[in-house]
Image (cartoon, grey):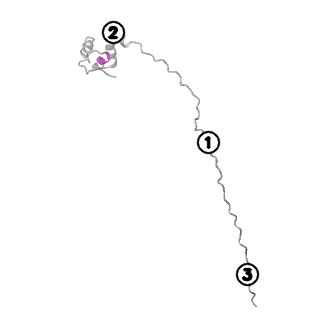
Amino acid sequence: MPVRIYDIAKKYGLESKEILAKAKSLKISAAKVPSSSLDKISAEWLEGELLKDHPDIAAKLAAPKVVEAPKPPPVEDKIQIISAPPPPPVEIKPEPVQIEVVTPAPVVETPTPIAR
Protein backbone atom coordinates (compact mmCIF):
# COMPACT_ATOMS: atom_id res chain seq x y z
CA MET A 1 0.00 0.00 0.00
CA PRO A 2 1.57 3.32 -1.01
CA VAL A 3 2.55 5.84 1.65
CA ARG A 4 2.77 9.59 1.07
CA ILE A 5 5.75 11.65 2.20
CA TYR A 6 3.54 14.05 4.17
CA ASP A 7 1.97 11.08 6.02
CA ILE A 8 5.42 9.99 7.17
CA ALA A 9 6.18 13.57 8.26
CA LYS A 10 2.92 13.75 10.19
CA LYS A 11 3.54 10.36 11.82
CA TYR A 12 6.92 11.43 13.22
CA GLY A 13 6.15 15.12 13.77
CA LEU A 14 8.80 16.30 11.32
CA GLU A 15 8.76 18.73 8.39
CA SER A 16 8.05 17.34 4.94
CA LYS A 17 11.23 19.10 3.69
CA GLU A 18 13.32 17.09 6.11
CA ILE A 19 11.70 13.83 4.99
CA LEU A 20 12.26 14.74 1.32
CA ALA A 21 15.91 15.60 1.96
CA LYS A 22 16.48 12.26 3.72
CA ALA A 23 14.71 10.38 0.89
CA LYS A 24 16.86 12.09 -1.72
CA SER A 25 20.02 11.31 0.23
CA LEU A 26 18.92 7.65 0.23
CA LYS A 27 18.45 7.89 -3.56
CA ILE A 28 14.71 7.21 -3.45
CA SER A 29 13.75 8.55 -6.87
CA ALA A 30 9.98 8.57 -6.24
CA ALA A 31 10.35 11.25 -3.54
CA LYS A 32 9.94 14.57 -5.34
CA VAL A 33 7.23 16.51 -3.47
CA PRO A 34 5.39 15.99 -0.15
CA SER A 35 2.42 14.41 -1.94
CA SER A 36 4.63 11.80 -3.64
CA SER A 37 3.75 8.20 -2.91
CA LEU A 38 6.35 5.63 -1.91
CA ASP A 39 5.93 1.89 -2.08
CA LYS A 40 5.70 0.11 1.25
CA ILE A 41 9.26 -1.24 1.20
CA SER A 42 10.82 2.16 0.40
CA ALA A 43 8.65 3.87 3.04
CA GLU A 44 9.69 1.36 5.73
CA TRP A 45 13.35 1.77 4.84
CA LEU A 46 13.04 5.59 4.91
CA GLU A 47 11.26 5.44 8.28
CA GLY A 48 13.98 3.17 9.69
CA GLU A 49 16.70 5.57 8.57
CA LEU A 50 14.79 8.53 10.03
CA LEU A 51 14.55 6.76 13.39
CA LYS A 52 18.33 6.18 13.33
CA ASP A 53 18.84 9.94 12.87
CA HIS A 54 16.26 10.88 15.54
CA PRO A 55 16.59 8.50 18.52
CA ASP A 56 14.31 10.76 20.57
CA ILE A 57 11.41 10.03 18.20
CA ALA A 58 12.24 6.33 18.32
CA ALA A 59 12.14 6.39 22.13
CA LYS A 60 8.81 8.20 22.11
CA LEU A 61 7.31 5.65 19.72
CA ALA A 62 8.70 2.71 21.67
CA ALA A 63 7.38 3.98 25.01
CA PRO A 64 5.59 1.23 26.89
CA LYS A 65 1.87 1.31 26.58
CA VAL A 66 -0.10 1.89 29.71
CA VAL A 67 -1.77 -1.32 30.72
CA GLU A 68 -5.16 -0.91 32.27
CA ALA A 69 -5.89 -2.81 35.43
CA PRO A 70 -8.28 -5.67 34.81
CA LYS A 71 -11.85 -4.87 35.64
CA PRO A 72 -13.28 -6.70 38.63
CA PRO A 73 -15.78 -9.40 37.75
CA PRO A 74 -19.39 -8.32 37.91
CA VAL A 75 -21.11 -8.91 41.22
CA GLU A 76 -23.91 -11.38 40.94
CA ASP A 77 -26.73 -10.39 43.25
CA LYS A 78 -29.64 -12.62 43.90
CA ILE A 79 -32.80 -11.36 42.33
CA GLN A 80 -35.24 -10.14 44.92
CA ILE A 81 -38.85 -9.76 44.01
CA ILE A 82 -40.26 -6.66 45.60
CA SER A 83 -44.01 -6.35 45.92
CA ALA A 84 -46.39 -4.01 47.65
CA PRO A 85 -47.72 -5.06 51.04
CA PRO A 86 -51.13 -6.72 50.96
CA PRO A 87 -54.04 -4.35 51.50
CA PRO A 88 -55.57 -4.37 54.97
CA PRO A 89 -58.63 -6.59 55.28
CA VAL A 90 -61.85 -4.72 54.71
CA GLU A 91 -64.44 -5.38 57.39
CA ILE A 92 -67.93 -5.55 55.99
CA LYS A 93 -70.59 -4.73 58.54
CA PRO A 94 -74.06 -5.94 57.64
CA GLU A 95 -76.66 -3.24 57.72
CA PRO A 96 -79.69 -4.00 59.86
CA VAL A 97 -82.59 -5.20 57.78
CA GLN A 98 -86.04 -4.07 58.72
CA ILE A 99 -88.67 -6.69 58.10
CA GLU A 100 -92.27 -5.68 57.90
CA VAL A 101 -94.70 -8.36 58.78
CA VAL A 102 -97.72 -8.05 56.56
CA THR A 103 -100.71 -10.03 57.55
CA PRO A 104 -102.95 -10.94 54.70
CA ALA A 105 -106.46 -9.61 54.80
CA PRO A 106 -109.05 -12.24 55.56
CA VAL A 107 -110.62 -13.62 52.46
CA VAL A 108 -114.35 -13.26 52.54
CA GLU A 109 -116.19 -15.57 50.31
CA THR A 110 -119.37 -14.31 48.87
CA PRO A 111 -121.90 -16.95 48.03
CA THR A 112 -122.44 -17.33 44.37
CA PRO A 113 -126.01 -17.67 43.29
CA ILE A 114 -126.80 -21.00 41.80
CA ALA A 115 -128.54 -20.79 38.58
CA ARG A 116 -131.56 -22.94 38.12
Q: Please tell me whether residue 18 is drawn above or below residue 35 in the rendered image.
A: above
Could you tell me residue 114's position as x and y percent? 75, 87
Q: Amino acid at mark 3?
A: Thr
Q: In this rendering, which labeled residue sits more in front, label 3 or label 2? A: 3
The Cα atoms of the two marked residues, 3 and 2, are separated by 139 Å
Query: Of helix, strand and loop, which mostly describes the magenta segment?
Result: helix
Judge by depth and name the residue closer to the eye, 24 or 61. 61
Quadrant containing the N terminus in the rendered view: top left
Q: Are marks 3 and 2 in contact (CB under 8 Å)?
A: no
In 3D space, how far apart are the residues under numbered discs 3 and 1 (Cα atoms)?
A: 65 Å
Mark 1 or mark 2: whose residue is earlier in sequence: 2
- Is residue 53 positioned above or below 106 on the image? above
Residue at mark 1 to residue at mark 2: CA–CA distance: 79 Å
Q: Secondary structure at mark 2?
A: helix
Q: Nearer the viewer, residue 36 or 91?
A: 91
Q: Which label was assigned to residue 107?
A: none
The 10 Å Cα crowd at callout 3, few under 14, some 14 to 19, many 20 or more, is: few
Residue designated by label 1:
88
Circle 3 residue: 110
Tag 3 secondary structure: loop
Q: Amino acid at mark 2?
A: Asp
User: Of callouts 3 and 2, which one flags the residue occurring earlier in the amino acid sequence?
Assistant: 2
- Front tag of 3 and 1: 3
**Range drawn in magenta:** 8-12
User: Which residue corresponds to the image point at 48% horizontal and 17% vertical from the top-left?
Assistant: 69
Residue 98: horizontal and vertical position, in percent? 66, 59
Write down the residue under mark 2.
56
The residue nearer to you, when weighing 95 against 32, is 95
Element assignment for label 1: loop
